[in-house]
C-alpha cells in the first residue's frame, strides 16, 4: 500500500472517532451551555452506555442485530434516566453552583465506576456488531459497520441540530440558556429543562458508546479518554457553542486518527492536551468562538 | 475578625498540641499504625499545600498531582540515575514542585474559575502522559523501586520504621507550623481577600495575579516536597502518583477536614485514610466510599469537619 492508501485509511479511522467524539462532546457542550455545569462524570455516562449495551445484547436472544437494536434503544434511555435522577437528587440541591457541582460530579464519577465494577466486573467485553459487511475500496476492504457509525452519528447530530433550532423544546432550552430568570418569568419550568438537558447530554454520550462498543470493548474505566477528548473538543470549539463543538470534533477526530497512524498516539495526546491548555489561556472564547453568549 | 485580638500563641497552640500528640504516638503505636501515620503525615503535607491554594486563596485546581509528581520524579530520578542522596533529593523535590507550579501558574492564572480548573487538569494530564511516553526511563505505570542504599539521610536508614516516622514527622511539622504562620501573616490575609472578593482586593491595590501566583508556588513547594519524601521514604515512584486521581485526592481530604482551616488537611487525610482502610476490610467497593464521601460533603457539609465546628461552636478555631 502506498501513502495514499495509508492516508485514506487514517482519514476513515479519524472520521469514525470524529463521529463518536462529536456525539459525546455535543452532550457535554449542551450541559455546559445551558446549565453552566462542568460535568466531570460525562465520561462515566459514556461508559454506562457501553456497559448497558453489553447487558442488553447478552440478554436479548436471536441474531446480533436484534440485540444491538434493542441496546441502541434501551441503553441511552436508561443512562438518561440515571442522569435525570442525579440532577434531581444532587445538582439541583446544590443550586448548580459551579464549584460544588464539579466536586459532586467527581463523586458521581467514582460511584458510577464502582457500580460498573461491582455489577459488570473488571473484564473488557466485546459486543458483537449487528452486521459484518466489508466494503471493498480500491486498496483495502473496510468495515461496513464503521461507515454505518459515521452515518448514524451524522443523522443523530442533524436531528439534534433541527431539534434545537426548529422545535418548541429547543426554543425553551435556548431561552433557559440565555436568561434563566426571564425564561422562568415566562412560565418555563427551568428545573425540568435542566433535568431534561442533563438527561439529553448523558443520553448522547451513551448513544455514542453503544455505537462504538462493537469496535472497542466495554470496560469500567473506558470513560476517561472520552471525557478528556470531549473537554478538549468543547474548549477548542468555544465553551457552550454547539456549532463550534461539531467543527472541533471533526478537526480533532481526523487529526487524532491521522497522527495516531503516523506517530505515537501518546505523543499525539501530549501535544493535543498542551495545545488545548494554551488555547484556553490565550483564546478563552475558543478557536471557532465568537458565536457564543 | 475576632481572631485578630488573640495573641499569636493561641493559634499556634493547637498545631503544637497535635505535633506533641504525634511525637508521643511513635512510642505507643504498633508498627502497622506507625507506618500508616508516616504515610498520612506526608499526604497531609501534600493536602496542606492544596489547602493553601484552594482553601485560603480559592484556587480550585485539578492539577496538583503534577506538582506532587514533579517532586517525586525530581528526587527519585536523581537518586536512581544520579545516585543523589536523600537530603539533596528532598531539596530537589521541593524546588521541582515549586518550579512546576510557577510554570503552570504563569500561564494558568491568566484564566479563572472553570477555565483554571480545566487548564490545570490539562497540564497535569500532559505531565502524566510524558511520564508514560518516556517509559524506557520511568517504567511508566509499573514504576521504579528505589534501592535501600539510596534512601539514607545523615547515616539514618529511611526504610526503617522509626526513622521513617521521624522523617515524615519532621517534614509535616515544618509544613504545619509554616502554614499556621503563613495564614496569620499579612500575606495570608491578602490570600483570603482574593478568595472572598478579588475585585475589592484589586481596588485596594493588590495584584490578584501576583498574590495567586505566589500562593500557588508555595502550594507547589508543599506538594513537591511531599512527593519527594514519599518516593524516598517508601522507596517507590510510579506514574499513578501523577494521574488525575491523585489531584482529586487532596481536594477530597481538604474538603473533608475543612477548607481554609489549619488542621483540616491533616484531619481529612487521616479520616479518609482510615475510612478507606476500614471499607477495604469490609467490602471491595473502595471507589464507592470516595464517591459517596464527596457527594455527602458537598451536599451536607460543604465546610468540612473543622469548618462546621468553627461555624457552630468555636469561632476562634485557626
Image (cartoon, coloured by chain):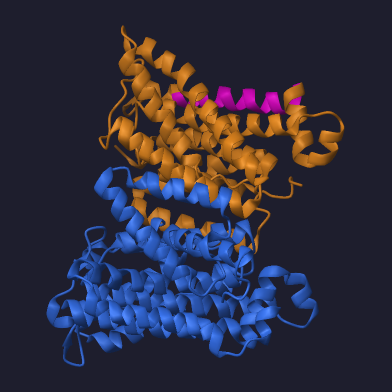
Chain colours: A orange, B blue
Q: With B261 as the anchor, is B168 left or right in this view?
A: left
Looking at this view, name the residue that lies furthest to the bottom.
B154
Out of A70 and B82, give the one closest to the viewer: A70
In the rendered image, residue B300, in percent from the top left (x then y), is placed at 57, 49
Residue A282 quadrant = bottom right
Out of B37 and A210, give the one closest to the viewer: B37
> Up-down: is B140 above or below B148?
above
Quadrant occupied by the N terminus of chain B:
bottom right
In the rendered image, residue B46, in percent from the top left (x then y), is placed at 41, 71
> Up-down: is B64 above or below A136?
below
What span is in magenta? A149-167
Asked if residue B169 is among those painted magenta in the image, a careful observer would answer no
Residue B138 seen in the current view:
yes
In the rendered image, residue B86, in percent from the top left (x then y), is placed at 24, 85
Residue shown at 58%/33% (left/top)? A201
Asked if residue A153 is among those painted magenta in the image, a careful observer would answer yes
- Secondary structure mostly seen in magenta is helix
Q: With A243 as the anchor, is A62 left or right in this view?
A: left
> Up-down: is A256 above or below A147?
below
Residue shown at 39%/76% (left/top)? B224
Residue shown at 61%/56% (left/top)? B114
Residue B73 quadrant = bottom left
Out of B251 and B5, give the one closest to the viewer: B5
Q: With B152 as the anchor, is A30 left or right in this view?
A: right
Q: With B206 as the anchor, is B270 left or right in this view?
A: left
Residue A220 quadrant = top left
Amino acid at each position: 500500500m502506498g501513502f495514499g492508501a495509508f492516508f485514506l485509511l487514517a482519514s476513515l479511522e479519524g472520521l469514525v472517532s470524529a463521529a463518536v467524539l462529536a456525539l459525546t462532546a455535543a452532550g457535554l457542550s449542551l450541559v455546559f451551555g445551558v446549565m453552566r455545569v462542568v460535568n466531570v462524570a460525562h465520561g462515566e455516562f459514556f461508559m454506562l452506555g457501553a456497559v448497558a449495551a453489553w447487558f442488553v445484547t447478552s440478554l436479548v436472544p436471536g441474531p446480533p442485530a436484534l440485540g444491538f437494536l434493542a441496546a441502541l434503544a434501551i441503553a441511552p434511555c436508561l443512562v438518561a434516566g440515571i442522569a435525570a435522577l442525579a440532577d434531581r437528587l444532587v445538582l439541583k440541591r446544590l443550586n448548580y453552583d459551579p464549584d460544588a457541582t464539579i466536586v459532586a460530579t467527581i463523586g458521581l464519577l467514582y460511584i458510577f465506576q464502582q457500580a460498573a465494577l461491582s455489577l459488570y466486573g473488571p473484564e473488557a467485553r466485546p459486543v458483537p456488531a449487528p452486521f459484518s459487511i466489508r466494503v471493498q475500496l480500491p486498496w483495502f476492504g473496510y468495515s461496513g459497520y464503521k461507515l454505518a457509525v459515521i452515518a448514524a452519528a451524522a443523522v443523530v447530530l442533524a436531528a439534534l441540530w433541527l431539534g434545537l433550532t426548529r422545535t418548541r423544546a429547543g426554543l425553551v432550552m435556548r431561552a433557559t440558556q440565555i436568561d434563566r430568570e426571564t425564561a422562568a418569568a415566562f412560565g418555563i419550568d427551568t428545573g425540568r429543562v435542566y433535568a431534561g438537558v442533563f438527561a439529553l447530554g448523558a443520553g448522547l454520550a451513551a448513544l455514542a458508546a453503544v455505537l462504538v462498543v462493537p469496535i472497542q470493548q466495554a470496560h469500567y474505566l473506558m470513560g476517561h479518554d472520552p471525557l478528556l477528548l470531549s473537554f478538549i473538543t468543547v474548549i477548542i470549539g468555544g465553551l457552550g457553542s454547539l456549532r463550534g463543538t461539531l467543527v472541533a470534533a471533526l478537526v480533532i477526530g481526523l487529526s487524532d486518527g491521522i497522527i495516531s497512524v503516523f506517530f505515537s498516539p501518546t505523543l499525539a495526546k501530549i501535544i493535543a492536551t498542551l495545545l488545548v491548555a494554551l488555547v484556553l489561556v490565550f483564546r478563552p472564547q475558543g478557536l471557532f468562538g465568537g458565536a457564543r453568549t | 475578625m475576632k481572631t485578630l485580638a488573640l495573641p499569636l500563641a493561641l493559634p499556634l497552640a493547637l498545631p503544637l498540641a497535635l505535633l506533641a500528640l504525634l511525637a508521643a504516638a511513635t512510642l505507643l503505636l504498633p508498627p502497622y499504625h506507625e507506618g500508616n501515620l508516616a504515610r498520612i503525615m506526608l499526604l497531609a503535607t501534600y493536602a496542606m499545600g492544596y489547602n493553601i491554594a484552594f482553601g485560603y486563596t480559592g484556587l480550585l485546581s485539578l492539577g496538583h498531582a503534577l506538582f506532587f509528581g514533579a517532586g517525586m520524579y525530581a528526587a527519585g530520578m536523581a537518586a536512581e540515575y544520579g545516585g543523589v542522596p536523600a537530603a539533596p533529593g528532598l531539596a530537589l523535590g521541593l524546588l521541582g514542585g515549586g518550579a512546576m507550579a510557577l510554570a503552570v501558574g504563569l500561564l494558568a492564572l491568566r484564566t479563572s474559575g472553570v477555565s483554571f480548573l480545566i487548564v490545570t487538569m490539562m497540564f497535569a494530564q500532559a505531565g502524566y502522559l510524558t511520564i508514560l511516553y518516556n517509559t524506557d526511563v520511568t517504567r511508566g505505570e509499573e514504576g521504579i523501586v528505589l534501592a535501600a542504599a539510596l534512601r539514607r539521610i545523615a547515616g539514618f536508614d529511611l526504610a526503617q520504621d522509626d526513622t521513617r516516622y521521624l522523617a515524615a514527622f519532621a517534614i509535616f511539622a515544618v509544613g504545619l507550623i509554616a502554614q499556621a504562620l503563613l495564614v496569620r501573616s499579612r500575606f495570608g490575609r491578602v490570600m483570603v481577600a482574593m478568595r472572598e472578593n478579588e475585585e475589592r482586593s484589586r481596588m485596594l491595590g493588590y495584584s490578584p495575579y501576583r498574590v495567586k501566583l505566589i500562593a500557588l508556588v508555595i502550594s507547589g513547594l508543599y506538594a513537591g516536597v511531599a512527593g519527594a519524601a514519599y518516593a524516598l521514604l517508601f522507596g517507590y515512584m510510579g506514574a499513578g502518583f501523577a494521574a488525575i486521581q491523585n489531584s482529586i485526592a487532596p481536594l477530597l481530604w481538604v474538603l473533608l477536614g475543612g477548607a481554609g482551616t489549619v488542621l483540616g488537611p491533616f484531619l481529612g487525610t487521616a479520616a479518609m485514610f482510615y475510612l478507606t482502610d476500614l471499607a477495604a476490610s469490609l467490602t471491595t467497593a473502595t471507589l464507592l466510599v470516595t464517591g459517596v464521601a464527596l457527594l455527602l460533603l458537598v451536599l451536607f457539609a460543604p465546610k468540612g469537619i473543622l469548618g462546621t465546628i468553627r461555624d457552630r461552636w468555636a469561632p476562634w478555631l485557626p
